[in-house]
Amino acid sequence: MALDATYNAKNIEDKWYSYWMENNYFHSTPDDREPYTIVIPPPNVTGILHMGHMLNNTIQDVLIRRARLKGFNACWVPGTDHASIATEAKVVAKLKSEGIEKADLTRDEFLKHAWDWTDEYGGVILDQLKKLGASCDWERTKFTLDPSMSQQVIKSFVDLYNKGLIYRGYRMVNWDPEAKTTLSDEEVNHVEKQGNLYFINYKIEGSDDKLTIATTRPETIFGDTAICINPNDERFAHLRGKKAIVPICNRVIPIIEDDYVDVEFGTGCLKVTPAHDVNDKALGDKHKLEVIDIFNDDASLNSFGLHYEGQDRFEARKAVTKELDELGVLVKTEQHLNKVGTSERTKAVIEPRLSDQWFLKMEDLVKPAIKAVLEDDDVVLHPKKFENTYRHWMTNIRDWNISRQLWWGQQIPAYFYGDGKEDFVVAETLEEAIVAAKERTGRADLKAEDLTQDADALDTWFSSWLWPMSVFDGLNDPDNEEFKYYYPTNDLVTGPDILFFWVARMIIAGYEYTGKRPFKNVYLTGLVRDKQRRKMSKSLGNSPDALKLIDDYSADGVRVGLLLSAPAGNDLMFDEGLCQQGKGFSNKIWNAFKLTQSWEQDASISQPEASRLAIDWYRSKLQQTILEIDDHYSKYRISDALMGTYKLIWDDFCGWLLEIIKPAYQAPIDSKTYKEVMSLFEDNLRILHPFMPFLTEELWHEIASRTPEQALIVNHWPEATEIDTALLEEFSFAADVVSGIRTIRKEKNIAFKDAIELHVLASEQSENRFETVISKLGNIEKMSQVAEAVEGALTFRVKSNEYFIPMAGAINVEEEIVKLEEELKYIKGFLRSVQGKLKNEKFVSGAPEQVVANERKKEADAIAQIETIEASLKSLK
């Protein structure tokens, strides 16, 4: 069957993905091979493929496909995360659009809607990954709310509670008023926002005195329970022991003293609102102040807000400010730049809020994880620069707030049997809870309806921190064959933005439950940004449609485009031109294969010396490249491994080898050369397959008819053998000679069909095995060594050898002399200009080192050009 003129990815991608699936190549079961395991960072169940997913999963697929070729039992476990906050918000919004309020539903009714949503949208992103070529073991697909997965999360909670590591406490937490749940510190982004500082007068009880305080949040005066002054601030010594009156609500509050107050900020006086600021809460505890919570769970004011009840906090701020002004107690307003905590998920401004929450003690849990990464290299971060970030987070860790006021997620397995805060038991099931409650209370008549399960759900990260273990049922059945075979896993590929959220916590959980690391290597990708270095986002409109990119440039083209400039840990400046380059690479390889298929073989022809040498050279070049890219893989320099493969195939195979062995027009090729070059082509496909799986599988089967057992995906990685370094050096020299000939042909418009002579004045490398190659690629009819310069010839240098191409009759000598003299004059002028700069001590000492180095390079290049032109002029005159 004739090959298409150009590579048509649309015709083959579905074909080969279906073929791989039908033959079950992605599925792994334990056997006697060494396992290689990757667990996918589970994307949100309601997510769609974006550029970050594309980069991350391309890297994982490269690693897993190479592992298969290296003979490992490769297992890549896919799955999705239930993403409590994000998914519940989407379901709530959908219900609201249908006129249904979450508050009007029971938990079970709401969860039915959530599961319907998940069933409809949950598999979208995994199907999209298939378009990219991801070779996951789809039979192993997990969802963090699968029964077995949830069972392990509950088992973990109960275990940690029984060890005394989980406790329930009344603490100030980060409250997201849009999602109506608490968040951990790590889920809060602190953003600089322009606000105001409001200066407000408080009357002093029993006198005409006033006290001015400055606040960024005047709406919180309804929660004020004290005014605090610094005991060392003599300005307010007369107010010690007195009381102030809060404007609008007219509550009488004490004036307290504490050196926490910054005498330089605002007026030096601080209004204390213990329910709505973590530092105020500490002051309140110290001075035994009343705690007044003025907000509802959506951050609207409650009844403590008097006539502002029901108003949103920001609307109330405007209205309260206006009333304070009308009362004559608003002294002034100043602009103030403030860092405001915002929810990572909903972007809502966070409210500090007091509530009962569940916490996990972290101080001792983190110790093995710190040692593993920072002392023992048991887990290695790539690049290592992220160890500093890891160290900062882990050594400054706080107890983890693991409860969320949501319904979508694993419900906390705490069962209350009384009215007191401590009247509860923790158990994996209701039946076990009844038994435990009977033992604790001594009440034999307790029934299921006497117990009430905590309504909160667990933080999603408390589920996913078990991921490398739970996907193999490791907590339910730690002795099962698969868990013992696949765990610990090998590599984790993820973004640095979840180094603490997920990576560090998985390491903590791994050592807590198995005493082993969850993975050996963590490859931290950069963020995908646009050409202006902006993070890609829907709001900026700078994030391309991932599937459209695949449609336009092919999956292989996009994979190459993403990886060409994606070094570990550094952000990728994405440009669609990179995908076009990937597509162009596909066409280059396709056309190279078409060229080989256009040759007619002849077994009776002897192999030309040039072909023999070229194949020996390329075999060594291939071996050298395999060693180099194996080294890149070992150091997780995936971009460098691709670039090494790219250059080998584009430059060395297509640019040199095929040109050398190519038979004359309409002439046949000898069978020996053809077979050897196709064997090398197959090796190229093997090392290229991880990056471009579709194109390589297609060509693999075009080269020969293969059985399913012989498919490229399950073939073998070529092993590096002996490298002839001398041959590589000689070829490199010969290639420079050919390039010199080609440059002269191009500059002088000498057609390749016109044979020329080449003479060399040699001081080194006088013997070169590649003279036949030089002759063929340069169309040299005569090559000889000379003892002195050849008159009337153009010349070029390779190292210290000088080459002459006699031009008598081929060009107008007088015109060429004039042209060269003009060029010489220009370059000498340029050299004087550069040397003038370099003689200027002020420039040399004051300019950046790189600028000076560039000028010195210009000087050296100009001197070399002058020598070449002068040699050419000498030979022409």
Image (cartoon, grey):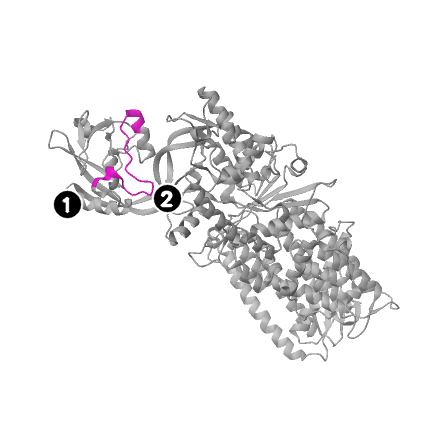
Q: Secondary structure at mark 2?
A: helix
Relative placement, left or right, of 253 versus 531 is: left
Q: Quadrant of residue 748?
A: bottom right
Q: Earlier in the sequence, mark 1 or mark 2?
A: 2
Which residue occupies 12% across, 29% down? 206
Q: Nearer the viewer, mark 1 or mark 2?
A: 2
Is 696 one of the magenta-colored residues?
Answer: no
Q: Quadrant of residue 29?
A: top right
Report if residue 297 lies within the magenta region: yes
According to the image, label 1 marks what residue?
326
In the current view of this chain or complex, which residue is farthest to the left? 208
Compared with 296, 710 (above or below) is below
Q: Front-most of 870 and 772?
A: 772
| Visible residue check, residue 766 | no
The residue that disc 2 covers is: 103
In the foreground, 550 or 755:
550
